[in-house]
Amino acid sequence: MAMECRSELSFALPVEPPSLGGRRCAASDVFSSHLWCRERKLVVPACAAQLVTGVKFVSRERELVCVTSGNSYFGAHLIRKLLVRGYMVRATIQNQVNFEEMKELLREEEMKQLESVVVARMTDLDSLCEAFRGCHAVFHTSSFIDPHGISGYTERMAFLETEAAGNVIEACSKAAYARRCILTSSLLASIWKGNNHEHDLDESSWTDEDFCIENKLWFALAKTRAEKVAWRKAMETKVKLVTVCPALVMAPSFPHADTESSLPYLKGGQIMLRQGVLATEDVDKAAEAHVYVYEEMDYGACGRYLCFGRTITTPEEAVLLENRLKMQQGLLSAYESDEIPARLCKSKLTRLLFRTARRLSCKQR
């Protein structure tokens, strides 16, 4: 029988992480057994639970938050930002083997600060309920990447991404305290309107799903449908939802850091460039934006937030992007003039970050 997701808080988070009685896990024992943490009433993988033993947290009101896909490149950066801000962080991964991937992305001391690491499949509602139980918020960052697809992403992946978004929101509504969700969408969910843009695009803009299907833009279709499903589910279940729509996430370690997601993002890159909507964002700034948007929910933050740093508008910028990603798509063939006007607006996020900076400045006085 499927485990029922309780709607009320059934435990109190301990002031100190639970002691595991000095039990040590052999390498072969990782995720092969589970420990029952009585203080939390949560089943977590044995070695993941041991990671928190003896760690003292100096946290922001000791809030526990959950980050899905902690083994992803962006997920790991978001975890790092949350730890720095003093949150207790629980991470989910899809499979046991993802734990080693996560260890490669996070430093050892950061892994030790994690509250726990939980195996929870995005298609399994019950496991998501258990993973989210007791959390003040869920940061849903997951993307289903198929490296064997023509562009790194297939129509099947788009279906799974949409299903996962609905499950995450439903689990948030059923798990104790987890009634806030910050969903990582994509700028792609706003920019595909056809071949011409008459107006600048902002949070009110939505991608045309039919256009994506006709042009096999599966990644854009997935992000658009997943976000729409999340909004619909959130309204039905009264989950407080905000979405952050980042541009192509970049970092100094590219192209090796996240090639699988950059390739599907850039399918149709020539058209994006010609229309002035091809943009990038630094991974650290994208992660910070997620944290600040969540914290500003206490002060009225809501809806969607476009998140980008630089819009590619000149030949020099296009060449730089191609070189960094070792692209073979020939973005420069899209140029009809020396410079293309940018048609993206992120004033909503800019205002939020300004308010955040002022609030933090006042607290430090």
Image: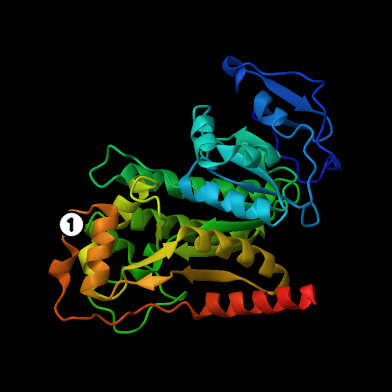
Q: Judge from the rendering whether residue 310 lies leftward or rightward of residue 287; answer left or right.
A: left
Q: Judge from the rendering whether residue 193 lies leftward or rightward of residue 103; answer left or right.
A: left
Q: Along the line of sight, which residue is nearer the eye, 245 or 157? A: 245
- In terms of secondary structure, where does tag 1 sit? loop
Residue with the mark numbered 1: 329
Q: Along the line of sight, which residue is nearer the eye, 120 or 231? A: 120
Displayed quadrant of residue 302: bottom right
Q: How would you rate the neighbour count of disc 1 (Cα within 10 Å): few for under 14, some for 14-19, many for 20 or more? A: few
Q: Judge from the rendering whether residue 34 lies leftward or rightward of residue 226; answer left or right.
A: right
Q: Along the line of sight, which residue is nearer the eye, 186 or 76? A: 76
What type is the residue that disc 1 sits on? Gln
The coloring applied to the image is: rainbow
Displayed quadrant of residue 146: top left
Decide if residue 218 is in sight here: no
Instruction: Give the residue displayed 61% in from the left and 49% down from the top.
Output: 170
Looking at the picture, how far across and down is residue 61, in whole percent? 81, 56
Looking at the picture, how far across and down is residue 316, in whole percent? 23, 71
Q: Along the line of sight, which residue is nearer the eye, 128 or 249? A: 249
Q: Is residue 266 above or below residue 52?
A: below
Quadrant into which the C terminus falls: bottom right
Looking at the picture, how far across and down is residue 267, in whole percent? 25, 56
Decide if residue 289 is in sight here: yes
Instruction: Give the residue displayed 61% in from the left and 55% down from the top.
Output: 81
Quadrant into which the N terminus falls: top right
Looking at the picture, how far across and down is residue 166, in whole percent? 53, 50
Instruction: Give the residue displayed 56% in from the left and 70% down from the top.
Output: 303
Total of numbered circles in the picture? 1
Q: Is residue 130 above or below residue 213?
A: above
